[in-house]
């Protein structure tokens, strides 16, 4: 059984992601790791309107529960395996994704972006959604960075909490928007 407080946090962060325009109605996913236990959003869930049924408890090893998990469970597990992440947020913010088409990194011009994120790596995988290749390149990039962008697909951010991972996605999108306004 998933703790009521954790459900509340998932709901709040999911709603914030949607309201901030950082993901589409049914896009993105989030997870939290506690030891060998992972709680992740359900495949096809609406982050802005999460219900108890939208959170799936699974483990670090593939199992039958994975059928209901976000397809990105393979990516989340890979990130948890090689980083200190306790939470992951994946979203589809437009300005960040646009920058990922042509850049190998997103370098914020604004003070907050530079301070919180530094240079953000953009990584490439032939199959961008839920592939072992995407899992490997993102996990590698997130060893050194709080957020990495999968080219044409969007950022995956790690944190000690969902709130921290959300902050990384939010700051990145603001920085990408500022770069656009500067014409860079």
Image (spheres, helix red, strand yellow):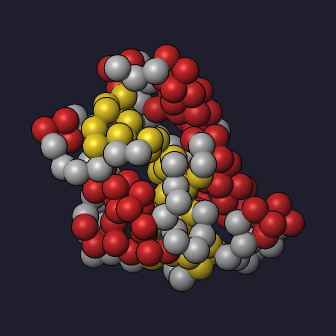
Q: Is residue 78 left or right of residue 108?
A: left
Task: State the image coordinates of residue 42 (x, y, percent, origin top left).
Answer: 31, 34
Q: Is residue 171 left or right of residue 121?
A: right
Please state, as top left, top right, bottom left or bottom right, where the N terminus lies in the image.
top left
The residue lying furthest to the front in this view is 35
Taking the image as drawn, is residue 58 in sight? yes
Query: Hey, which quadrant is residue 39 in on the image?
Result: top left
Please state, as top left, top right, bottom left or bottom right, where the C terminus lies in the image.
bottom right
Vertical relation: 134 (above or below) 47: below
Q: Residue at x 57, y 63 (%)?
A: 147
Q: Residue at x 67, y 76 (%)?
A: 119
The residue lying furthest to the left in this view is 64
The residue lying furthest to the right in this view is 111
Vertical relation: 157 (above or below) 140: above
Task: State the image coordinates of residue 104 (x, y, percent, origin top left).
Answer: 54, 82
> Which of these two is toward me, 30 or 181?
30
Task: State the image coordinates of residue 59 (x, y, percent, origin top left).
Answer: 28, 43
Q: Is residue 169 left or right of residue 141?
A: right
Taking the image as drawn, is residue 98 in sight? no
Task: State the image coordinates of residue 48 (x, y, percent, origin top left).
Answer: 50, 28
Vertical relation: 4 (above or below) 79: above
> Which of these two is toward me, 168 or 15?
168
Q: How many marks?
A: 0
Q: Residue at x 72, y 72 (%)?
A: 118
């Amino acid at each position: 059984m998933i703790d009521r407080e954790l459900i509340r946090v998932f709901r709040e962060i999911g709603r914030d992601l949607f309201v901030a325009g950082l993901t589409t109605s049914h896009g993105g996913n989030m997870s939290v790791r506690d030891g060998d236990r992972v709680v992740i959003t359900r495949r096809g869930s609406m982050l802005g309107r999460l219900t108890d049924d939208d959170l799936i408890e699974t483990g670090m090893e593939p199992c039958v529960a994975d059928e209901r998990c976000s397809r990105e469970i393979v990516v989340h597990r890979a990130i948890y395996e090689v980083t200190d992440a306790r939470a992951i947020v994946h979203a589809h913010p437009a300005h960040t994704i646009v920058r990922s088409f042509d850049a190998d990194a997103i370098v914020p011009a604004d003070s907050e972006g530079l301070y919180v994120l530094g240079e953000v790596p953009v990584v490439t995988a032939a199959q961008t959604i839920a592939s072992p290749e995407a899992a490997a390149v993102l996990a590698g990039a997130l060893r050194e960075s709080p957020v990495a962008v999968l080219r044409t697909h969007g950022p995956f951010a790690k944190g000690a909490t969902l709130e921290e991972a959300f902050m990384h996605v939010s700051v990145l999108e603001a920085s990408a928007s500022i770069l656009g306004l500067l014409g860079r």
